[in-house]
Each structure stands twice: as structure tokens, then as C-alpha cells.
Image (cartoon, coloured by chain):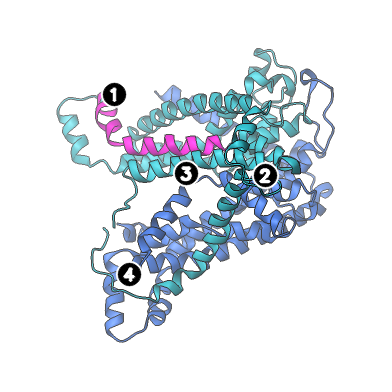
Chain colours: A cyan, B blue
Amino acid sequence: MKSRSPLRPRKSGYLFIAPYVVLLGAIGIYPAGYVVYMALTSLSAHFTGLSNFIDATHNAEFVPAFENIIKFLGIWLTTLVVFVVGLSLMLHSLHGRVGAAFRFVLYLPAALAGSASVMLWLFMLQPGKSPWGFVLSWLGYHSLGDSLAPAHLPVIFALIAFWSGAGSWIVVMHGALATIPDEVLESARLDGAGAWRTAVHIKLPLIKKWIAYMVIGAFAAGSQLFAEPQLISEATGGLANQAWSPNQLAIFLAFHYDYFNYAAAISVDLLVVAVICAAVILLRTGLFDVGH
Amino acid sequence: MYVLLAVFAAFFALPIIWLVFEAIGVHLAPIAHNLGLWLFNSTLYSAAGAAIALATGIPAGYAIATHEFPGRRVLLILTMLVMLIPTSALVLPLFLEANEVHQLTSPFALIVPYGLYPFGVYLSYLYFHTERFHVLLQTARTDGCNEWQVFRHIALPLAKPVAALIVFLNIVASWTNFFLPWVMYWSTDTTNRYPLPLGIALQLFGGETSGEYLGVVQLHTTSPPSAIAFLLLATLAPVVVVLVLARRWIGSGQFQSVFR
């Protein structure tokens, strides 16, 4: 697949990569460096070490924000793994066209990515306007505010994230399952393994790498949650928490100039999480070849 | 098992079906004036961003795949690292930077970040890092072509499939992006720069919400649900259009075979 023929040394390579490297420096490296610098200094540019990080944790919203995001991640990652893997395995056992048709339906929401799906779900959660109205009234909710009660939020965000994200992951898992050689499945069949045993003992272990990629990727993206809780907050006219997630808290602080450095500190916290996840995917899942 | 699959299919499909039915009865007149502005902005940001991503990504991936130079492996690893970081992690740093260079309300606050597309570089690298290309390029080099000629006359014409893919993925990401525009424009109330997602949010939340406590909060939108539904479908449409166009270019099996 990959060529091993030698690459002759060429200085002209620098010209080709120059525009990209400049952009990477200006939009990737520089902002990251700048935010780290802001996190380590005070408003008057004195070096303050880790005190911004520590002071940020004293903010009344800090701990709740991280509690919220952890609750959300717990629900979402579990749902993701169980249902994406389960659905993928089920669809894989179906005949080509039927499986493809189901996959298409499950993928549709994923094309309506990002904020649009949240806004759509605001209608889904509004008793009276929602086609799911019967479920909402059975649960005793009579207004949007009832649906959006604080205790429900981790579940709601997990629901929205699952609805809009599962389709893409199912497509990825489908690709992963497609790499399993037919001979392996055939010999399992000849050995008398039924659909369930084949799925659990043969297919599942072979797609472990992709499941790990999905979990780590979802963890990284989920920890940065902003748009969904922000839109929910706007929908309730600000009655619902404006600093529900750590990223929201960071943005909220950033808009008040005195707290720029605390905002930077929280942002660095989240950035470190994201970088660690990226490094783990890169170095430990074996899905990306870094060795040349 | 089929019952379970049917239940899930309903869960995923029902909101979309609702969306389509709602949008059918739409009266466009009340929102038409702003819709034009939002569509223009979204098109501008996405098109310009994709152009930059393409112009920087194809040559960079090509060079990493076919040239040997110090720092090559570092650049590749850095590219992969950055592409795996969720973009939301970089929004606040970008906001601080835009603030520092006084570009907070300019179109460049979005266009330039959209142009940084390490995943595009990675795709380009995968595309050119094959036996087939190495042989092709080696032949051209021994025939006396200089590097620029090789790139311009051999690599570039053959790059259409990966170029189409990069453009498609980049546009999908930028068209539906909410967080970055929100931080750059909503907070500073720069309504004339709003892309489509922000415009929809404006329509959605412009009305007053009733009540002082959560128990009676209802969604009072500036426009009726049909208009909102139509706008939401509008965020979906360009994705479909670009996908159709990109598939033409990518061809049915040609792209997959290059990757193998």
C-alpha cells in the first residue's frame, strides 16, 4: 500500500510546505502559545506561575461545570459504545442493501451537523410542538422549561450528541468491519458459530482499535462541549446556567476583561485534555502510522 | 433484532421527517431579507476557507509524501496531532488572538482559521504516498523535469479526487460551525457578519421567553416553526450539493483504489 522507494533529498520541499507551515504557526501554534502565556501571567504581565489555575478552581462555577461535563461524558460514552457497536454489528449481519438503507437513515442526522441539530431538538423537547409530545406528557413535562430542568441536562446533551453523531461512527465501524477477511468469518461459520457468537468473539475483538478511537475521540470532543449548552441557555432566556460546561465558563470569563487570565487557565486545562487524547490516539491505537 | 433496528431508525428519522413537513408550509417573505445576507456570509467564509485549505494542503501533503527534508517527520506528526484535536479546544485561543490583532469583527476572523486544515494535508499526504506516484515522479525527474514542473504538470492534474474530498469535508465543517462565529460575532453584536447558523439562532431566540422560572418557559421564536425548519434544511442543502459535485469528481472506484 505505502511505497518504500527512497525519497531523494530535496530542498524544494520547503517551498511546497511553506504556506501551510505559516498558517499552522499563525493559527495553531501562536494562539496555543498565547493562551498558555496568558494563563501563566497576570493582567499586568507579571509571571504568576500556576496561581491562575488554582484561583480559577475557586470560582463558584468551576467545580459544578466539571461535574456537569463528567456526568454528560459518562452517559454519552456508554451510550455511544453500547449502541454504536451493537447497531453496527447488527447491521453487518444483514444483507447488503438492507444494511445500507438502515445506515443511510442513521446517518441523515449527522449531515445536519452542529448547532442545527440542537435547534431542531429544542422543538423536539417542547411539549405541544414536538412529534414526541406523547412521550413528554407521559413524563409530566408541560413546558420547554420542564424538559430542560437542570437535572435532565446531561441526559439531553447525551441524547442530542448521540442522535447527531452515532451515524458517522456507524459508518466508520462499517468500514472497520469490512476489513475482516471473509475467510475468518467463513471458518467461524463452518465451526458452527452462530451470529451472536461470531459477533461477540470474532468481530468485536477485531474492531477494538476503532472502538478505542471512537471513545477517545468522543471524550476529547465531548469535554469541549459548548454549542449545545449555550443554545439551551439562550433558549431559556438565560434562566438556565450560562456556565454549565467548562468551555462556557472560560468564554464567560473571557468576556469580562478582568478575568482574561482565568479564562486562559481553564482553556489550557481543556486544551491539555484534548492534546493528551490526540496523543493517545496517535501513539496507542495503531490506527495511524507514525513510524517513518 | 429487527424490532430494535426499526425503533432506532424511527428515533433517528422522525425529527428529520418533522423538519421536512414543517418546512413545506413556509412563507419566506419575513426572513428573506436577512436570509440573503446570511447565505452570502456563509458562502464567503466557506468558499474562501476551502480555497486556502486546498492551496496550502495539496502542496504540503505532496511535499511530505515525495520529498525528503529535515523536519519532515516532525511536521507529519504535528499535523496528525493537530488534526485530532477538536476545533472547540482552539476557539478561545483564536478569540484571544483575534482580539489582540483587532480582527474580531472582520471576515478574516473566520476565513483564516477555516483555511487551516491539517486533515487536508494528511489526506493529500496519503494520496501521494503511493507506489504509483513515486514511480511516476521518478520517471519525470529522470526525464529532466524540475520540481515545479513535476508538481504542476503531473501531480496537480492527478490530484482532483483528493482535492474534491478536501473541499467537501472542509466546507461541511465550516458551513455548520457555530462556536467560532458565535464567539467572534455574537458577543460583539456584529449582526451583519452572521453566517447561517447564527442567523437561525437569532430567529430562534429573538422572541421573548415567557415566565421568570423554568416551569413555564416556552420557545417563542421571532418566526414561525416553518421558517426555522426551512432554515435548518438550508444548512443541510449545501452539504448535499457539494457531496453530489464531489462524487462526480471523485469517481466511483478510482479514489478507493488509489488509497489501496
Q: Which residue is mark 4?
A: B68
- Mark 2 or 3: in front is 2
Given residues B89 and B222, the one toward you in this image is: B89
For label 3, the SS is: helix
Residue underneath mark 1: A196
What is the number of the mark on residue A275? 3
- Which disc, if any, is residue B10? none
Task: Indicate the amino acid at tag 4.
Answer: Glu
Residue A36 spot, x, y in % from top left? 57, 47
Both labels 2 and 4 in a single chain: no
User: In front here: A74 or B137?
Assistant: A74
Residue type marked 2: Ser
Q: Which mark is residue A42?
A: 2
Q: Name the chain under label 2.
A: A
- Of the two numbered discs 2 and 4 in the rendering, the one whose residue sits closer to the viewer: 2
CA separation in Å, label 4 and label 3:
27 Å
Q: Chain of mark 4?
A: B
Residue type indicated by callout 3: Val
Q: Which residues are magenta?
A: A196-224
In 3D space, how far apart are the residues under numbered discs 2 and 4 (Cα atoms)?
Answer: 44 Å
Prevailing secondary structure of the magenta residues: helix
Q: Residue at x 36, y 58 (%)?
A: B253
Q: Earlier in the sequence, mark 2 or mark 3?
A: 2
Q: Are marks 2 and 1 on the same chain?
A: yes
- Nearest to N terminus: mark 3 or mark 1: 1
Spatial separation of the CA atoms under disc 3 and disc 1: 37 Å
| Quarter where residue A134 is shown | top right
